[in-house]
Image (cartoon, coloured by chain):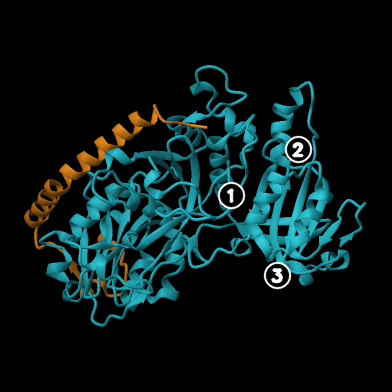
Chain colours: A orange, B cyan
Amino acid sequence: MSTQFELIPDQEKKAKPLFENEKAYQEFRASYYEQIKPELDRQREARRLSEEDSRKHFVY
Amino acid sequence: MILQENSLLPIVTADPVNLWYEVMRVASPHLDQRGVDRLEKAVQSRAKSVAVERHYIDKDYRDTFTNFHAKKFSTPDARCLRLHFFDRIIDHASILDKAMVESNYLGYSVVRPTRPNCIGRTLFDPRACGLTDCHISLCREEVSIQGTVLEVSGFPFISQDTDVTVCAQSALWMLARYFSNRYSAHPEIYPFRMADLTRDYSIGRVFPTSGLYIWQMAEALRQIGYSPIIYDRNRYNTPGEFEHLMYTYVESGIPILAAFKEHVVVLFGHRSDFSSPETELQEAQPFVFSSRFNREFIGNDDNGFPYQVLGNLNTDCGIPYKLSDVQQFIAGLPEKVFLSAEDFQTVVTNILQHQGVGYLRLSPLISSQKPILRLFLTSGRSFKKRLRARGMGNPIVEDVYRSLPLPHFIWVCEISHSDIYPQNVLGEIIWDATRNPYELDGCIALHYPEMLIVDQGSALNGKQHLLTISVRSHTNYPIFGNNLIRI
């Protein structure tokens, strides 16, 4: 696991986990996913429609 | 005055009024009035001497000559001229001495025997064209003039020959030549090969070309190793969203192909104005993107000359369209960039506003003013190379970034305030550009002035493991500035 390497000397003393436990971490992931999903879906659809539009756009 | 007029390298030196007349006389019949007009607009009165390299074998023209022009009943000359421009009076003795002329070299332009457009491969120093107060992508070339090797940095330009290339192929060529000049991983592509890339994706004949659809241009880029994304203005309805995406790629050092109704150009730089940010700061959004300060793009239009501007005002030296006329653009991303600009924007702005890890909760300093965000793509190698010079606000942050394994490409969102921008920043978020946006593990580091959050787990190819490190003393530090060159 990653703890066997240190990014900085004395990492044990200087760094601590962002989340106190696994439950808090999973709650963060779930809330963040719900937050971003609608916008990512909109962007994906916009790219698909852009590709469709590019089939009719001729330059010369 | 024309020195050694009958030699293979006559040098024209004259006053600005007569220079171009003399150049056309020496360079005829390859160079015509239309070509002179373009060159004169490009370098104007800055050129004091022009060396005319006769019987020049140009790799790009020879490619189209061999594959197309040689098949005509009446064949044009197989050779070209190459014009070398200098900003002082020179003679043949000074050309032999690199030290005497290298700082005066403005660049070169190949003149083809093609009509109606004779201007072939061209590379001018942007300063030679009067370009100032902007940021642009540049590549470098070495140029040999009878054995004297000079250097010139610029963005490649070529005009269409109307047989093998029209604006679509010319724009593709300019983009691809920039990348092949700058990065050894990209192969050099010649015009006929460029045009032939769409052979399997065309209906009807490929040559002589009549033009390309935008999707065919994207396909051509894909064929030579890029990972293109197409954006259509009508699909991005938020005001300024389309221009913001254009800016984000250009700011990342990724030239874009911007398509108008019937024409396409390559854009590779921008000109911004940060002098009075009050209007932008009063807008309702929680952040101000640096793209809001952009006033113009810098680009090459094959129907014009190098380094023209594209804004919302028509200017004499501009591309003859407005920015609002851009209907679509293609961003030719490197193969290993899976995360698009808009997806990065979505994930990073949501992190910044998240109730648990957002700046309103964790950073009183950033919360004290409306943040300015600058989004850009860069390589992990390039980011690390500048850590020492930038300092990153605190030695611990610099040390962590230095030892942290990074992917080939990273997206960066720099966070700043109007009173220190565009010189300095307060922090940044680094995101893995190889991530799917729906994955939640792309956040490599989140750096606020008060703390650093870093994912040690993903950095070591394991499960996400986010660590926080307190930052006790913090200073502002310089923005990252390697993608574009300030002119």
Query: In the image, which disc is placed on residue B103?
Result: 3
Q: Quadrant of residue B292?
A: bottom left
> How far apart are labels 3 and 1 at the CA level?
26 Å
Residue that lies at the very extreme toward the top in this rendered image: B204
Amino acid on which the number 3 mark rests in the picture: Ser
| Residue B484 coordinates in the image, percent (x, y) | 48, 61
| Residue A55 coordinates in the image, percent (x, y) | 39, 27
* Chain of residue at mark 3: B
Q: Name the mark nearer the viewer: 2 or 1.
A: 2
Amino acid on which the number 2 mark rests in the picture: Pro
| Residue A22 coordinates in the image, percent (x, y) | 10, 55
The secondary structure type at the circle numbered 2 is: loop
Left/right of residue B447 with respect to residue B38 in the rendered view: left
N-terminal-most mark, 3 or 1: 3
* Chain of residue at mark 1: B
The secondary structure type at the circle numbered 1 is: loop
Contact between labelled residues 2 and 3, with CB atoms less than 8 Å apart:
no
Query: In the image, which disc is placed on residue B10?
Result: none
Rendered view: B462 above or below B279:
above
Residue drawn at 17 percent across, 48 percent down? A36
Residue labelled with disc 2: B113
Rendered view: B345 above or below B448:
above
